[in-house]
Structures are given as structure tokens and as C-alpha cells.
Image: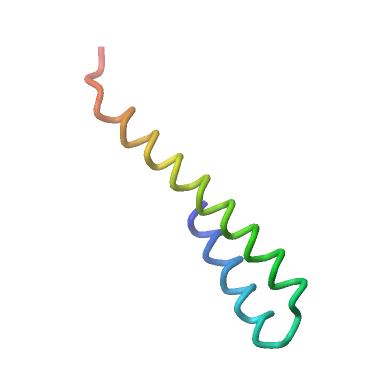
Amino acid sequence: MIYWALIFLIVALVAGVLGLTGVASIASNIAWVLFVVGLIMSIIFFVMGRRPRV
């Protein structure tokens, strides 16, 4: 997820430099959502991994 968030962030930056504000806006929103989802999943996996196996 974090990898795809970085890809969309790069797309947003390139689109912003080229003046494509609509594409930059959508790409940055997608990057933000993917980053948040990846962060939440990382926290969940970190907490779940600390439990002892039965």
C-alpha cells in the first residue's frame, strides 16, 4: 500500500509541475487514502503479531 501511495504521490507531483491540476488533485487524494490504509494495516499487523501463538 505504501508503495502505491508513493507512486501516486510522484504522479501528483509530476502532474502539478506540468499544470494538470485536476490529475494532480485526484492523484494526491488517492495517495493520501492509500497511505492511511497502509498505515492502519501496518498498525493492525504490528499489534496482531505481538500475541503469543497458541
The image quadrant that residue 50 belongs to is top left
Residue at (37% x, 39% y) in the render: 43
- Outermost residue on the left side: it is 52
- Place of residue 32 in the rendered image (x, y in percent of width and height, measured from the top left): 57, 57
Name above or below for residue 12 compared with residue 31.
Answer: below
Left or right of residue 16: residue 43: left
- Place of residue 42 in the rendered image (x, y in percent of width and height, measured from the top left): 40, 42
Q: Nearer the viewer, residue 41 or 25?
A: 25
The image quadrant that residue 54 belongs to is top left
Name above or below for residue 15 compared with residue 50.
Answer: below
Residue at (64% x, 60% y) in the render: 29
Q: Nearer the viewer, residue 4 or 14?
A: 14
Residue at (67% x, 65% y) in the render: 27
Name above or below for residue 1 compared with residue 9.
Answer: above
Name above or below for residue 42 compared with residue 20.
Answer: above
- Outermost residue on the bottom side: it is 18
Q: Nearer the viewer, residue 14 or 4?
A: 14
- Place of residue 23 in the rendered image (x, y in percent of width and height, measured from the top left): 75, 71
The image quadrant that residue 30 belongs to is bottom right
Left or right of residue 1: residue 44: left
Q: How many labels were placed on the picture? A: 0
Left or right of residue 28: residue 52: left
- Outermost residue on the top side: it is 54
- Place of residue 16 in the rendered image (x, y in percent of width and height, measured from the top left): 66, 81
Residue at (45% x, 41% y) in the render: 40
Applied colour scheme: rainbow
